[in-house]
Amino acid sequence: MKPTPIYLDHAATTPVREEVFEAMKPFFGPRFGNPSSTHRWGREARAALDEARERVARCLGARADEVCFTSGGTESDNLAILGVWREARESGRNAVVATPIEHKAILGAVHEAKAEGAEERMVDVDKAGTVIRDSWNTQVRDDVAIASVMWVNNEIGTIQAVPDLAADAKSRGVVFHTDAVQAFGKVKIDAASQSFDLLSISGHKIGAPKGIGALFIRRGTKLQPLMHGGMQDRGRRPGTENVAYTVALATAAELTLAESEKECERLRVMRDRLEAAILASIPDAVVHGRGAERAPHVLNISVPGTDSESLLMVLDLQGIAASGGSACQSGSISPSHVLSAIGVSPDIASAAVRMSLGALTTNEGIDRVAVAFPALVTKARQFAAAS
Amino acid sequence: MRERVLVAMSGGVDSSVAAALLVQQGYDVVGATMKLFCHGTDVPDRPCCSLDSVNDARRVCEHLGIPHYVINLETRFGEDVIDDFVSEYARGRTPIPCVRCNTFTKFRDFVIKADSIDAKWIATGHYARVVDGELLRGRDDNKDQTYFLWGIDRSILSRMLLPVGESTKAETREIARQLGLSVVAEKPESQEICFVPDGDYMKILRGRLESNSPALSRGPILTIDGRHVADHEGFAGYTIGQRRGLPGGFPVPMYVVGIVPEDRAVIIGEREHLLGSGVIAREVNWLSEVPAVGSHVQVRIRHRAPLADGELIRIDADEIEIALDVPVSAITPGQSLVVYSGETVLGGGFIEGSPDVAAHTPARARLPILAA
């Protein structure tokens, strides 16, 4: 009999929580209305949408009108970068600041802004992926439309000092955005006491379905919509709202926060145990992001002399799901831009395996991986040496 | 414990059916598509190795309920196959990249992947058969692909499964229909070289050679008696036996009979000047015990050309010479010489040329076969 599969890819996506699934159901049934309609069906949907917006706002320490529902992290990031820059360029702020270890959704949006005439500025990061403050200080000036720094890196888990950076940006009059897709539930997020202007979250990383996210937009932050049409969400995001999914996001966000402290500790203990076990049997393994403050659910590790493509195949064939760097669209794996940016050599970068823990992770699973991973790696190294 | 097989899946009908048959036969089948090159966004729809093909292979694996992976071999394929393809044209030869892909990519690099996942077997959709450790021609004479397979390491034969080698192409398509592999059953045959978009190999050469490279520069078109009759815009655009693009005004049809890269010359002659009564091949690889000098063999000098009878008259290290019973036309340097005994592939090599074709070369020029 095959052993139970072990899912160690929660940074890629998470299973929909049972409570979330239940909460959505009425909206696939009797509460099917369009929230923009004036009749009873419309009102019933509108009530759920309004409530969902308030619930998400509460989870972020925000006001309801500061929450804009989107299709997910990518749309939130694009709306933040392009929306703000397109608005600000008219007032002479033409530069866009980001770090080289941002998610592709940010980098892609920044490149698009550049293609439309923006000045692109990348802030240097150190070997653990932390923003270098000197570089930040020289890049973030009064000609910057928006600066964006990812709160928790999706590949290596590095946590940035986002509250500090946001405050610093504010003191320079620069709009600050953070991609908090991996950070939600892992670090304290509070729009009331922290001064970020925009913040992206995504539903499917926290137990809601794929296809829903939100962008926090602080009152007074001017941005242009990406799409044009009706006046939904004050015209910031036209299109009939996906009511069921907004309810899902609200429910998932609340559940995530309620369990956050305990769950983070649980994941941290397991992650550290797995990391220690692997390092004990493979002393030359490289743990990326080590030395920085790291989110508790990510372990990104390279074993010299292996390649992640083969390792991921053998892991998968043994029922262990992990991931490499960013996957390219064909499904093949190219070395991660994040690892390159923190100065990891191509050889080591192409060996990177990211294991990310979450709801499905158990002690038994971690114990099994702690044995299986070093065994597979040892074998892979023998093949690599022979070929 | 079921034996594991790693199947190289291009997204075409042959490798899809190969995978399906292996599933039926009870193997633990793992599908993989090799990503060998990238045209970026230049070529939206390539019939082989493109994103679409990866998607098709994945759809077939989903249908069969087996895992599918993409294996990136771009770097090594670039070095082993594409770079060689370019340098062969630069040397005035007509390369056959599928041989090197089989030798170095499919049946070497891909085998290493198979090893890494504990796959005892590797499978492809080639029309060829392996029986008792020997490589045999596929049952479908029209589709036989042994012309491209002679270069693989002999030790790999015992691990190869070639399930469609027993079928004709029509039968393969029928199996695909029966198995509901609608994604691939009616796919058109790809005849082109996978990394050459639209068959325009000159575009690849222009992208990879210096613009003033001799192979892409103007040079003389000479008759075999040395008469300069016209100019060409790069000898890389010519291959032995070609008629297209040659100057007219001759009483009989003229053909390219030689390319002399040192002089940038393309030599033209009449049909009889294409005939060679012997073949010299190098980089010879044997898939059987080395046959004795004097053995009577059958050879093939071009894909789908009829088999020719001959005698193995010389073996020097990795070079062999075959004396043909009846002269054959257009023995082309860079193509394969494959040596058969009946259905069995004994081995093969890359054609250097024909000893007597050199006799047609003008005095001032030397054929590459003698220059190499």
Image (cartoon, coloured by chain):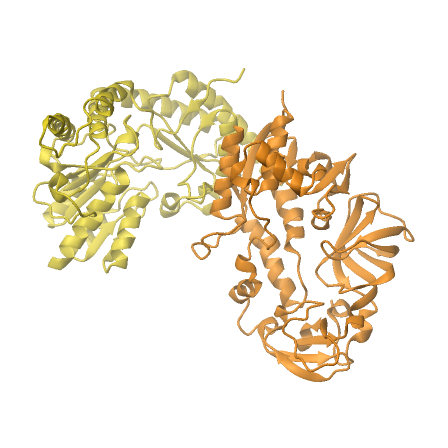
**Viewport quadrant of the C terminus of chain B:** bottom right
Q: Residue at x 50, y 48 (%)?
A: B50
Q: Nearer the viewer, residue A92 or A230?
A: A230
Which image quadrant for residue B187?
top right
> Relative to A328, is B357 on the left or the right?
right
Horizontal and vertical percent position of residue A192: 9, 33
In the rendered image of this protein, does residue B76 appear above or below residue B113? below
Q: Nearer the viewer, residue A196 or A13?
A: A13
In the rendered image of this protein, does residue A120 appear above or below residue A379? below
**Residue B67 visible (yes or no):** no
Horizontal and vertical percent position of residue A223: 14, 48
**Viewport quadrant of the N terminus of chain B:** top right
State the residue lying farthest toward the right.
B294
In the rendered image of this protein, does residue A28 appear above or below residue A340? above
Chain whose colour in the figure is yellow? A
In the rendered image of this protein, does residue A100 appear above or below residue A27? below
- Callout count: 0
Q: Colour of chain B?
A: orange
**Residue A379 visible (yes or no):** yes
Which image quadrant for residue A364?
top left
Which image quadrant for residue B277?
bottom right
Q: Residue at x 23, y 35 (%)?
A: A213
Horizontal and vertical percent position of residue A250: 19, 26
Horizontal and vertical percent position of residue A347: 48, 44
Q: Nearer the viewer, residue B30 or A384?
A: B30
Q: Residue at x 26, y 31 (%)?
A: A203
> Relative to B170, is A101 on the left or the right?
left
